[in-house]
Image: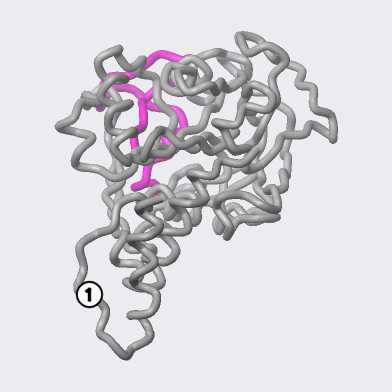
Amino acid sequence: MKNVRCKQLLSIGLIAYALFGANSFAASIAYIHGRVANDGTVLAQGVGSPYDQMLLTDSGRTGLSEFKQLVEGQGHAISQFRDSSINLNAAFLNNHDVVIFGLHQKIWSSSEKTSLDSWLRAGGGMFIYSDSASGGFFGDVGAQNTTGQTVTNNLIALYGMQVTVDQADGTNGQTVNSNTSILAINSLTLEGEGVSPVAITQNDASVEVLVPYKRNKNPLIPHPQNISIANPEYASLVLTAIDDGHIIVMFDRQPMWNDGPGSDIDEQDNRVILRELVNFLAERPNVVNPVDPPVPGNGDAVIAPILPLLLDE
């Protein structure tokens, strides 16, 4: 399934990148996390011992310090926020180009989702994934606890996507399609463990499957509970355009962490894929940042007129 709009916007972004360089797309990124105990109790700040928060400031095995370095290495700025401490309103969202929803527990209100939708349609980028760890330690709360599924679907169901509960299905390497809108990840391998694949309506042209999901080459999954899409297609990574913005949904958390059990940021092509996903969302390719015009004679003058033509289409 192809999304022509995604490809057009990506083409504009790639041309602008070639003309003006990576710093033209330096973005402000918000990373939103929660705070939950092993038994699933949501903890107040500074109280108790949280389970796997996956913080940007954590250099431990299940921390995201390497992901933070990866993002900052692309010229972007990324900051973390506790879910319960923020309101997804225009005042917050308009300070950021991309919002990443990590393991969190907050059910966002209707007004917050309306603000998020408006921000997305104006060109914002959103990245989200699901995991049983949103509900605590799987040994205490069960791998199929619904916390991660519920909080994720609260945000993405409006756009024709739902995530499953954790399948607790071991490590899975899934191959990126060869003709995606994000050209740099084509045919690479994304690896996660446990996995909460994304359910979409079969042949839904509004959602592009970047990475299909196969369980031991079987399209069926053992735990489809709470999926209301009839006869869904399952995917490991999907992209959808929301007017001028984009949403990317990933099937697991483990591709992001430093060196935890199962997969991690350095397994297979996870690091490259994450870099390209962040850059795609951060570049907001429908927006051309004001820059100095290219100097005639340096080779740019021939390419520059292409931008207005693409924007007019």
User: Label 1: which residue?
Assistant: 293
Residue 24 placement (x, y as % from top left): 29, 64
- The coloring applied to the image is one colour
- SS class of the residue under badge 1? loop
**Residue 150 vs residue 131, the one in the foreground:** 150
Location of residue 103 (image quadrant): top left
* Residue under the point 72% across and 39% down: 171
Magenta range is 31-59
Left or right of 272 on screen, residue 217? right
* Residue under the point 69% across and 51% down: 189
Name the residue type under label 1: Pro
Instruction: Tell me the quadrant of the picture where the N terminus can be found.
Output: top right
Is residue 52 covered in magenta?
Answer: yes
Specify whether residue 109 is in view.
yes
* Residue under the point 61% across and 41% down: 2
Residue at the farthest right position: 217
Residue 235 placement (x, y as % from top left): 66, 32
Residue 267 placement (x, y as % from top left): 64, 53
Is residue 246 covered in magenta?
Answer: no
As drawn, 63 above or below 308: above
Left or right of 310 on screen, residue 269? right
